[in-house]
Image (spheres, grey):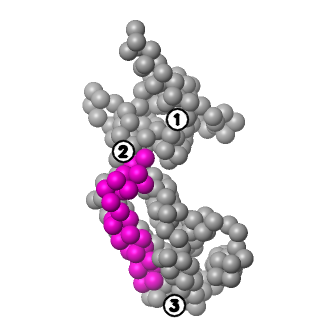
Amino acid sequence: MARALRGQAAVAAELSVIDEETAADAGMSAVDRAYHRISDAILSGSISAGKHLTEAAIRDEIGVGRGAFREALYRLESDGFLELHPNRGAMVRRLSRQDLAEFFQYRVVVESYACKRAAQRIDELGCRDRALELFRELRGYIEGTEARPFVDHNEDFHESLVQLSGNRILYSQWKRLRLPMLRIRRVMEAWPPQDRGSVQQHVDILEAVLDGRESDAEQFMAAHIQQTHRFAQRLSDQDFDRVFNP
């Protein structure tokens, strides 16, 4: 009986982190609803790395059938959130140092190419205006007048430059890297931008894009991403797990 009660308590705690979105689910398919509710709980750290999901309880709470739930799990596995094991169910994926290295290798290839394309397209409709918006915000950080946290700017900066590539397939694939992207935000929060030179690096990248210097834009972005990777890999094992596997 005590074991059963403990099990029920654990299920209740697990479900409490997935139980807040109702209006936001309106209009979603059952598969999308399950996918977003579970991925959001993982991204927030409410469902921790290495945790096994309790399928029946979560499926009932979300209100989806077994088929839709399983399809959502397959998508979550494909996007790097979960590991699926026969006879053991679904477990939230832990990120290893090798996973992180491959993630940054991918980002170097994709984002440096995106910057090259952004520089090539800078005079196409809307491209220069978006780059200038980011540039003006950077001036605010340099002058001490910008109130928005730099980590928020950083996310917009990288996403905007991928969008400015004009390649929708590239952008959609880049967006699938949500789990390591969110974990990288924790690194950014612990590493002030002035200490890593990120503000000036962002300025250099945008100036190259705005001037149409595609080779410089490509190289500057590659160096910028590689710097963050080196910092993340220097974390102790304890800090690495605290950041990437909460």
Label 1 Cα crowd, 10 Å radius (few <14 / some 14-19 / many 20+)? many
- Residue type at mark 1 is Ala
What is the chief secondary structure element of the magenta stretch? helix
- Separation of marks 2 and 3 at Cα, in angstroms: 40 Å
Residue 1, quarter of picture? top left
- Separation of marks 3 and 1 at Cα, in angstroms: 44 Å
Q: Sequence-wise, which precedes: disc 1 or disc 2?
A: 1
Q: Which mark is residue 34?
A: 1
Residue 230, quarter of picture? bottom left
Residue situated in front as seen by the camera: 32 or 178: 178
- The image position of residue 130, as x and y in percent, is 66, 75
Residue 146, quarter of picture? bottom right
Provide the residue span drawn in magenta.
218-246
**Which element type, helix, strand or loop, lies under badge 2?**
loop
**Which element type, helix, strand or loop, lies under badge 1?**
helix
**Which element type, helix, strand or loop, lies under badge 3?**
loop
Q: Residue at x 33, y 67 (%)?
A: 234
Is 25 located above or below residue 203 in the figure? above
Q: Which mark is residue 206?
A: none
Q: Residue at x 38, y 56 (%)?
A: 239
Label 3 Cα crowd, 10 Å radius (few <14 / some 14-19 / many 20+)? some
Residue corresponding to mark 3:
213
Label 2 Cα crowd, 10 Å radius (few <14 / some 14-19 / many 20+)? many
Residue corresponding to mark 2:
93
- The image position of residue 115, as x and y in percent, is 50, 78
Q: Is residue 132 visible?
A: no
- Residue type at mark 2 is Arg
Left or right position of 120 against 48: right
- The image position of residue 72, as x and y in percent, is 46, 37
Q: Is residue 151 visible?
A: yes
Q: Residue at x 45, y 14 (%)?
A: 5
